[in-house]
Amino acid sequence: MKRAIRYVLNHVPRRHIQRVVHLVTPVLGLAYAGRGVVCPICGGRYRRFLPYGYVTSRANALCPRCLALERHRLMWLYLVRETDFFTAHPRVLHVAPERCFIRRFEQLLGDLYVTADLESPLAKVKMDIQHIPFPEESFDVIFCNHILEHVDDDRLALREMYRVMRPGGWGILLSPVNYNREITYEDPSITDEAGRERAFGQKDHVRDYGRDYPDRLAEAGFTVESIDYAATLPPEEVTRYALRHEIIYLVRKPQ
Ligand SMILES: [Zn+2]
């Protein structure tokens, strides 16, 4: 099973996977029937979650029903418990929206919820995050997860997100961070897939963020909080929701 999932992730374009994966995983979910883990987003209960991963696959990661991974479940719990996201009717820009969130946020917010992507068929607006086609201060909240490591000029993208956020607004901007690196490694002269995979760990990444990732977010003007949210939860919840100790990077635009 692990090898099959890894093969598909590595050989089928992501936009095709996004179209059909929700048809396939419920069937896989039957094989995982049980009560060991709970998805806080869709309420699904399973023996454990499906394995997932591009390079090395990890067990107990992917919710068969809503396709949430550990970081999505963590972010959901954070939004529910630590923010006013579900009660404040925010105007939201969700870049490269994750399928597990789209329907729920859409139901909650309707037209206040704008999804955007360069190519995903799931998004309402087609856009390059380096040139966001919205005026200043258009959004209260911005989500942009696992995108910046693919973007040529991430500093420009961050300045754009800062521009369209209202003062006092906030966002969650997650990227893979290599905690063994002090300083982010990037080299725009490496443009081929094999070279990028060797240098940055994945064929469509253009950099490998280091521990200075929050500094780069701050360069755009944001204040940044790095939150190990799972560490604040009881261990039985970490197990029940199958969470990992992933850092939530919370940005705010000063008033
Ligand atoms: Zn789920």
Image (cartoon, grey):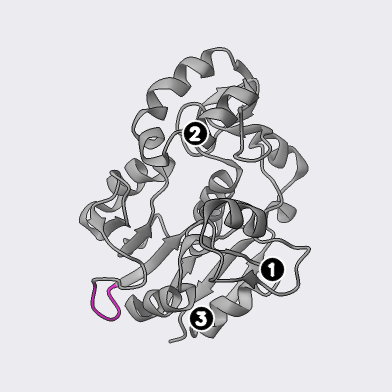
Q: Which amino acid does label 1 sit on?
A: Gly
Magenta span dominant secondary structure:
loop
Is residue 237 toward the left or the right of residue 83 in the image? right
Q: What residue type is labelled 3?
A: Phe
Vertical comparison of 186 with 56: above or below: below
Q: Which label was assigned to residue 222?
A: 3
The residue beneath circle 1 is 210
Numbered disc in front, either 1 or 3:
1
Which badge, 2 or 3, is on the more N-terminal residue?
A: 2
Q: Which residue shows up at 32% across the image and 76% down it?
A: 164
Task: Tell me the crowding category of disc 3: few under 14, some 14 to 19, or many 20 or more residues within 10 angstroms, Cα based.
Answer: many
Residue 22 image-quadrant placement = top left
Residue 65 image point, x, y percent: 46, 27
Which badge, 1 or 3, is on the more N-terminal residue?
A: 1
Q: Give the range drawn in magenta.
A: 134-138
> Which element type, helix, strand or loop, lies under badge 3?
loop
Q: Which label was assigned to residue 11?
A: 2
Task: Tell me the crowding category of disc 1: few under 14, some 14 to 19, or many 20 or more residues within 10 angstroms, Cα based.
Answer: some
Vertical comparison of 216 with 194: above or below: below
- Mark pair 1, 2: CA separation: 28 Å
Q: Which residue shows up at 65% across the image and 68% down it?
A: 226
> Which element type, helix, strand or loop, lies under badge 1?
loop
> Which element type, helix, strand or loop, lies under badge 2?
helix
Numbered disc in front, either 1 or 2:
2
Is residue 212 toward the left or the right of residue 158 in the image? right
Q: Which residue shows up at 69% across the image and 46% down it?
A: 244
Residue 90 image point, x, y percent: 33, 64
Check if residue 141 falls in the magenta segment: no
